[in-house]
Image (cartoon, rainbow, N blue to C red):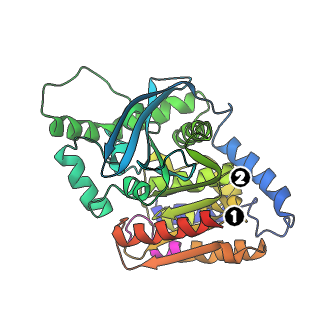
Amino acid sequence: MNYREFVEYLMKCCARYEYSYLGSSWSDLDFWKGVARSKLRELLAIEFSPEFLDPSIDMIYNIDGVSVEKVSYRLAYGGRAEAFLMYPRDRVGKRLPAVIALHDHGGFKFFGKEKIARVLEEPSILVEYKVRSYGGRSWAFELAKKGFAVFAVDTFLFGSRRIEFGEGSSKGIDDVIKTYNESSYKIENLVAKVLSVFGFNVLGTVVYEDLAALEYLFSRSDVIDVEKIAVAGWSLGGLRALLLGALDDRIKCVAVACAMSTLDEILLNGIEHAWTLYILNAARYFDLPDIASIHMPRPMLVQYCREDKIFPLKGQIKAHEKLSNLYKKAGAIQNYLGIFYQKPHIFDVEMQEDAFNWIERCLAD
């Protein structure tokens, strides 16, 4: 059986995108958003209201003019979720516009939030990862230096939320991290199967934990302006950002980097992503741009990279056109910005600065 022909058959028979706002059945934006959001929660198998328990501030340290709170809270399952809340040291009681900064996948699960934040000691393997992915910067930390309160949290399967088997190791830290990252693919496969037995899925569990993180952030009105919250991320972080924006209208602005394509081009090209991309039964109801558009009419930035090997260029172009048409139908074309870069799958300094400037303008309005 030819793979491409097989996927073409599936796309032809079953990719209906019934809940796309571009469909003739939909005209009232608010009504559609309610229906689409409910269906998305159903597909993600988010059955419970997100909540956090027993929050604590476990450590505070200062680096380069930024105060970093290491916070944690308990979820209904697993250990405590850990996060960094970063803000300018000299804020003097001022409530700041806030950004939820969402880490990527990258096959690097030993760490989550540390991939985008500054920590007191960074193993060389983490430094090298930041060079490859982020131009050597801890972009969430850099955003905090610009006057934002930035919240970077571990999500399901990463960092403090990772799942481990066996005993500890006496190897050096770089070797321990490398060994775990290499085994984490198998762990993710196993967890996906286990979740399916109970009617859940990996991406839905990730999103549930991100929604709980959002609730924690809203509880921190001592630091943040709850009327000015954005979400941003690259790769898996970008997907997490668009899903949070789709599920909660309290988020004012969404910035997505290297996480957008139409589904058909990803599937037809045989590009194998982690379980964190796939939503059971999604194509019957939504294409990926349709899911992102539930955030409408609020502002969205999507950064596309023409040399991206895991989000095909043709799919990126089609997604950009679709998002433009969706925002146009919603009467909010001015609130969508898509930027194309001649770059591979990366979130380098140029892209970061473009995103930072856009977020600053968006939250200032």
Which residue is depicted at the point 66% across and 54% down?
246
In the rendered structure, the answer to whether residue 69 lies left or right of residue 12 reads: left
Residue kind at label 2, given as amino acid type: Asp
- Tell me which numbered mark, 2 or 1, is placed earlier along the sequence: 2
Q: Where is residue 327, by image quadrant?
A: bottom right
Between 2 and 256, which is closer to the camera in this rendering?
256
Which residue is depicted at the point 58% across and 75% down?
337
Which of the image's four quarters has the C terminus?
A: bottom right
Residue tagged 1: 298
Depicted 132 relative to depicted 102: above or below = below
Whole-percent x, y for residue 47 in the image: 68, 33
Q: Where is residue 284, by image quadrant?
A: bottom right
Whole-percent x, y for residue 124 in the image: 17, 47
Whole-percent x, y for residue 99 in the image: 53, 53
Please give the label number shown on residue 249.
2
The residue carrying pointer 1 sits among few (fewer than 14), some (14 to 19) or many (20 or more) residues within 10 Å by Cα, namely some
Q: Give SS at disc 1.
A: loop
Please give the label number shown on residue 13.
none
The residue carrying pointer 2 sits among few (fewer than 14), some (14 to 19) or many (20 or more) residues within 10 Å by Cα, namely some
Between 148 and 251, which is closer to the camera in this rendering?
148
Residue 255 within the segment the image draws in magenta: no
In the rendered structure, the answer to whether residue 129 lies left or right of residue 81 reads: left
CB under 8 Å between callouts 2 and 1? yes
Q: Give SS at disc 2.
A: loop
Depicted 342 relative to depicted 232: above or below = below
> What range of the chain is rendered magenta?
308-316
Residue kind at label 1, given as amino acid type: Arg
Which residue is depicted at the point 85% across and 56% down?
31
Depicted 150 relative to depicted 302: above or below = above
Between 216 and 263, which is closer to the camera in this rendering?
216
